[in-house]
Image (cartoon, rainbow, N blue to C red):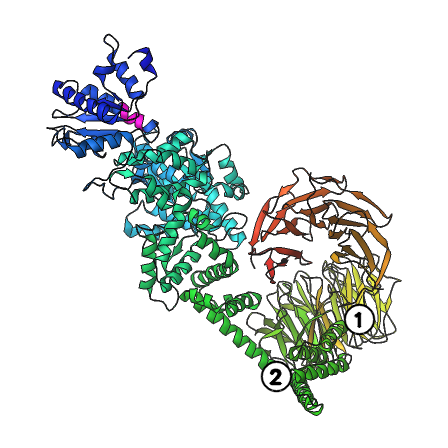
Amino acid sequence: MSDQQENERYDVYLDYNHEAADEGQVVEVLAFRLRNEESLKPFFDKWHIIPGKPKQEEEVKGLLSSRTAAVFVGLTGVSGWQNEYMRAALDQAQRKEDDFRVIPVLLPGATEDKLDTLLMRRAFVDFRPGLDTPEAFQRLVAGIKGEVIEVAGFNLPDEPAPYRGLLRFERQDAEYFFGRKLDTQRLIEKIEQYPFVAVIGASGAGKSSLVRAGLWPELNMDAIPGSRNWQVLMFTPGKNPLRALADQLATLLPPSDRVEAADQFEARLKERPDGLRTAIRTLLADQPRPALLIIDQFEEIFTHCVETPEDCRVRNEILFANLADAIQNGEKQLYAVITLRADFLNPCLSYAQLKELLQDHQLLLGALDEPALRDAIVQPAQKVGAMFEKGLVSAILRDVGDQPGQLPLLQVALDSLWRLRRGPWLTIDAYEKSGGVSGALERRASDAYEGLNPEQKALARSIFMRLISLGEGVKDTRRRADREEIYPAGVDKTQVDAVIQALSGPQARLVVADEGAVEIAHDALIQQWSTLRKWLETNRQALAIHRRLTEDAEEWDEQLGRDPESLYSGARLALVRDWYREHPDDLSDLNELEKTFLDLSLAKERNELEEAQRNLKAAKRRQAILASLLALAVLATLAAVYFGVRTYQQAQVVASQLLAAQSQVNVQGDLPLGLLLAVEALNVQDTIQARSSLLAALQASPYAARTLYGHRDDVLSVAYAPSGDRVVSGSLDGAIRLWDPATGLPLGNPLTGHRGAVRVVAYNRAGDRFVSGGDDGKVIFWDPENGTKKFDFQVVDDGMVLALAFSPQDLYLAYAGTDGLVWLWESSTQQKRLASQSKHSGAVNALAFSADGRYLASGGDDKKVLLVDLQTGEEIDRLQAGANFLSLAFHPTQPLLAYGMEDGGIRFWDGQERKILDEKIQGPRAGIRDLSFNSNGRLLVSASQDGLLRIWDAATRKAVGKPLEGHEGQVWSLDFNPVNPNLLISGAADTRLIQWDISRGPTIAQRLLGQHPLVYSMALSPDGKILALGHRVDSVTLWDPEAGKQVGEPLKGHSKTVNGLAFSPDSRLLASASSDGSILLWNLTEQTHETLPTPTGNMAVWDVAFSPDGQKLAAAFEDGTLVVWDLDSRQMLSGMPLEAHYLGALSLAFSPDSRRLATTGADGRVILWNTTKWEQQTIASLASDVRTIAFSPDGGLLAFGGDDRLIYLWDVKEGKY
């Protein structure tokens, strides 16, 4: 080859058997025809190699300078040298662009068996009938030019198909898996270095294919010395990863032993952190060799969890502990490779043992570079003898770009291209017809769906919805579902199976199905198919409700033994019931188990309501109320007729107004009747009078949270269970009732055991029993679970039991009555003894233990309080007064005793100083029937004979707010909730119990007078003295909510709307956030303000919040970021701002203990942040903006709501709705 020829390009390199002279002559004839008839430029050795130059080198140069290669095979087959050049040509085809083709040519006398193995799959040109065969010459020219021609009768078989569509490459597909050679080698090297590797990449990067079709076959070929003998175990985690791992371990045993062995392995994993390591060692003891554990789709540990977050975390920690132990202590007996979506890396890092494994042991799988991408496109086709039309590969590369998530789309496009091939050719026309990289998946999915009839389409939609796990802070992912779960109730299973077959068959391959389970073939379908995305967007809330129903029904069936108590009730049932009531079509998607679960839940609710209605109807007061309502309804109708009302609507208005008027008449003397009348007025017709009457009724007793009906006579004693979720009460008629204070409903039938009135009830501190004492002089021990008597004993022979009290550690039960003696019953010996030698000269009305259990106080009708030191049995003090002692209460944390007297006074005794304090409370001249401190000791509430409860500040002895009104007649008993310091229960002579919530504000509604601009934000100071309003026209006004008047001049400092306001815990500082991007901190004492530093830009700030400990201020920004400042330095915390929401961050709230911060956004997500490390957890992902959020006072509940007009309650501890 001359120097001038060095840079020449040839159309085709002609390779033939130089040892057969006649073949050279035949090839030269064809070379002449190519040059003369088609103007092609062939490289033929006799024409282009200069004598004297190294022939082999010149041949290689000619090959490298050619666009294609034709390998001629004659009678003698392929010679040695020719074979070398042929292999070089094939290598060139793999390295160069798509219009380099290797074309086998059969010459006269040749047979197909003379083709080399590497050529056999390629479409060949057949000159065996003769060199003048027009069709053969035409095909040779077309192959050289890269042009498609129609050739009758020639095609490639459908199988093997070189591309996988949405399906991953499996081990048996390794010969068609290209593009990841370097990544496979890097993965092998990492495994050699350390026995754990995490393959991490975006969805669609090819992680599963790399491990299955790349790594595994290489290990089988001893890529690591001895790896061909490794025992490979592979699984995906699913709903129960521990069980999935146990099932894999059991595959090493005979089939008959596997189920029992899997049970044992699962138990072993849960019981000990070395369970995996010891199991592997035992199973492979007969043939010692390493095991390779492949955990594919590792993110399912998070996406498929159906238990509470706490239970899932415990389960995950068990798995990770076993994995870490086997890797770190197994002496390379176990190797592990996991595949993980990159967006789930952060949750993995919250587990210390997994984080340690991941550290420095990762293979990050990014996008394929162009050469690797070209390999993935071209080489599978070449393996089966297919050829790309000239320019097609370049077009595909251009469409793919450099995004790793494009690989599934590429495979679908190539699979469609393969199906539309023309003979051996993959054509541009077919590529465009299939939709290309961007449209092939959309077209395939739509074609498969549109090919179904209407009934099948409905089933297909239901199937797809079940196969998706909604992402919370991450993209939605596919979900494996058992076939039994997919079958809707009342639908023939064969119909569902037919749809699954259509979606999983070779023409669609949208889902993967076997006899047991079904799943979407790849997450790419969820992201790319517009129809499926639309279903998700419009049905996201329905899907969230349905998914929770599915999980709860399965748990009820599989783990809880179909326990009736585990059926839906309350708010959760209301949410599901209301949804399906408004969307009845969705009921058709429920399977048999879900439908049974929901039907039984609804039936249980109906039964409970009927029981409640029966109880209410049995109450005398309820009968009177209903009679009054009926009479008033008749009166309203008659009045409407009398006044000549002609239309039904006008009649309803008149009736509503009359009911409202009657409500206001009854509010002061009969509050329950007044409330019911107001509600009924509003139900009849929404009028101004009805609203006003309801507000007036609520205002009359704003703290009354719930009224409990069920007793027929005076309620003499009430007590909460230590858990705060049960109440016991005793009545004058001898009945004892257990209650659910959350619903206000009695639990079961009344308990009977006393002859005469039940004067006192009390729970022990453990909550496993309660006691009652009555007029018959007996004390009865009860089991609160089933309402049965444990045992009883006689206390007073000829009198009544009036007081009972358990010591803080349940060591003693103290009891006393009309005989003046105070007894102690020891729980350990079940023996009784006198508390001291002292005795009251009259009845003992009250008993109380100090918080440490050391002191016992007793008060009685002899106007004395006796205080006994239980360690010595000695009387340490005797308090004397001018009135009888009716009630006693020790402070929960201090040695402070409060005692209430018949004259309405409350006095205090200091146990440390052993003296009566000078401060006292003197209420109205009405006996203090009962006293109770709340659980934090800040408040003391008294119940008196005038029917009122009064709240006192325990430190200042001052009254807090107005008395609690709601009972008629004297209040006999009260008790604070041991868990919630704002809840208390009372029982009175009106036969009712009332649960009060003193966290409620005393004012229901009050209009602030004055002209001021449109209000966009507001905040009430913690001390309740200032209400701040943020306005559209850049100012903040301050108001006195008690007086209803503006305080001072407006605060000016912003240039745009004030979107958010927040007071500091001490009420001294006010933070304001504005659309102008600024956050101002106002000192309300000094009337000054300062501007906090914010991130660059003028992004609007939507909300601000102080932490309850006063150390931090947080703000939510328009771009979705979260910023937190240190209030001491007024500087942003390190690492700020935090990426919180995809769209704007709209609202935020700190938990009462300041350890959590909740944020909401326009992306529909609710995020819970740890305020120490600022780690985030997405707890909800709704289909609409979430605009407001708040923690309950105890931090146990998180409430949020937004544009969907629903309020959601999240149990922070349980991690569920």
> Residue 1128: image x %, image y %?
77, 41
Left or right: where 971 falls relative to 184: right
Helix, strand or loop for the magenta stretch, by majority: helix
Query: Label 1 near label 2: C-beta < 8 Å?
Result: no
At label 2, the amino acid type is: Lys
Dot 2 alpha-carbon crowd within 10 angstroms: few under 14, some 14 to 19, many 20 or more: some
Secondary structure beneath disc 1? loop
Q: Is residue 143 magenta?
A: no
Secondary structure beneath disc 2? helix
Q: Which mark is residue 688?
A: none
Left or right: where 1076 falls relative to 449: right
Q: Quadrant of the N terminus?
A: top left
Q: Quadrant of the C terminus?
A: bottom right
* Magenta highlight range: 88-93
> Residue 128: image x %, image y %?
12, 31
Residue assigned mark 2: 617
Compared to 1138, does 454 lie above or below?
below
Q: Quadrant of residue 985?
A: bottom right
Dot 1 alpha-carbon crowd within 10 angstroms: few under 14, some 14 to 19, many 20 or more: some
| Label 2, label 1: how far apart the Cα atoms are | 30 Å
Residue assigned mark 1: 963
Q: How many numbered markers are drawn? A: 2
At label 1, the amino acid type is: Pro
Compared to 1031, does 181 lie above or below?
above
> Residue 1014: image x %, image y %?
76, 58
**Mark 2 or 1 closer to N-term?**
2
Q: Quadrant of residue 1198?
A: bottom right
Q: Is residue 167 visible?
A: no
Left or right: where 224 falls relative to 1039: left
Is 502 in front, or is 418? Answer: 418
> Residue 803: image x %, image y %?
72, 73
